[in-house]
């Protein structure tokens, strides 16, 4: 993957995910602080605004990742978690953070989020990367965090 920023700097590989996550945080900051109570709807609105702007850069990535996990989930192989763990191990912290928000969005919540929870795809996600900390952490079942659930 490659991104070109406004100053013609080229951002490559995993650094792209840091850049996208920074952009998501900036989008969140533009929306302001959430009111007390349920965080799902405002989180979805923030992510949708972000995704609308960067879908052309990120869309294929999440579609590909979803289909890899869906393939394993629907396959007749035993010990599916062994195979999903191999893919999960390749995800950087910022990839997992973006996956977190993609899967609670309206486009990911019904199909991808259950796979995240079933296969503990957020097991290595540092909780301090979540924009609203524990409030966002609770948007997923504990199973999404595997052995690192808090």
Image (cartoon, grey):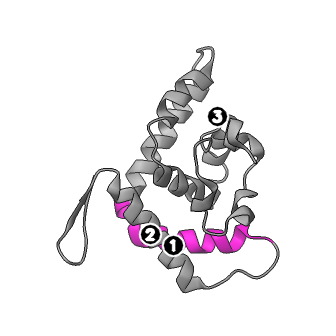
Q: Is residue 113 above or below residue 26?
A: above
Q: Which residue is mark 1?
A: 25
Task: Read off the magenta span.
Answer: 38-57
| Mark 1–mark 3 distance (CA, rounded to whole Å) | 26 Å
Q: Which residue is mark 3?
A: 119
Q: Position of residue 94 (x, y in %)?
A: 47, 55
Identify the main secondary structure in magenta: helix
Quadrant of the image occupied by residue 16: bottom left
Q: Nearer the viewer, residue 111 or 44?
A: 44
Marked residue nearer the N-terminal end (3 or 2): 2
The residue lying at 55 percent from left, 29 percent from top is 84
Q: Nearer the viewer, residue 109 or 147?
A: 147
Asked whether disc 3 touches disc 2, contact meaning CB atoms under 8 Å apart, the reply is no
Quadrant of the image occupied by residue 42: bottom right
Res 22 label: 2
Q: Nearer the viewer, residue 13 or 104?
A: 13
Q: Is residue 35 above or below residue 107?
A: below
In the drawing, does residue 59 fall left or right of residue 15?
Answer: right
Marked residue nearer the N-terminal end (1 or 3): 1
Q: Nearer the viewer, mark 3 or mark 2?
A: 2
Q: Is residue 65 above or below residue 1?
A: above
Q: Is residue 47 magenta?
A: yes
| Mark 1–mark 2 distance (CA, rounded to whole Å) | 5 Å
The residue lying at 49 percent from left, 28 percent from top is 86
Q: Position of residue 19 (x, y in %)?
A: 37, 65
Asked whether disc 1 touches disc 2, contact meaning CB atoms under 8 Å apart, the reply is yes
In the drawing, does residue 32 fall left or right of residue 89?
Answer: right
Q: Position of residue 68 (x, y in %)?
A: 48, 34
Q: Nearer the viewer, residue 28 or 62?
A: 28
| Mark 3–mark 2 distance (CA, rounded to whole Å) | 26 Å
The residue lying at 41 percent from left, 64 percent from top is 20
């Amino acid at each position: 993957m490659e991104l070109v920023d406004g100053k013609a700097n080229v951002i490559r590989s995993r650094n792209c995910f840091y850049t996208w996550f920074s952009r998501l945080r900036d989008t969140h900051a533009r929306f302001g602080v959430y009111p007390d109570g349920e965080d799902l709807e405002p989180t979805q609105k923030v992510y949708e605004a972000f995704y609308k702007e960067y879908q052309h850069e990120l869309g294929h990535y999440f579609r590909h990742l979803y289909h890899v996990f869906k393939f394993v989930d629907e396959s007749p192989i035993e010990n599916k978690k062994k195979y999903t763990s191999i893919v999960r191990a390749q995800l950087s912290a910022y990839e997992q953070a973006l996956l977190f928000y993609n899967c609670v969005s309206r486009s990911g919540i019904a199909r991808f989020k259950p796979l995240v929870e079933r296969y503990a795809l957020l097991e290595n996600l540092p909780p301090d990367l979540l924009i609203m900390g524990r409030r966002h952490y609770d948007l997923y079942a504990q199973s999404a965090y595997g052995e690192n659930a808090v």
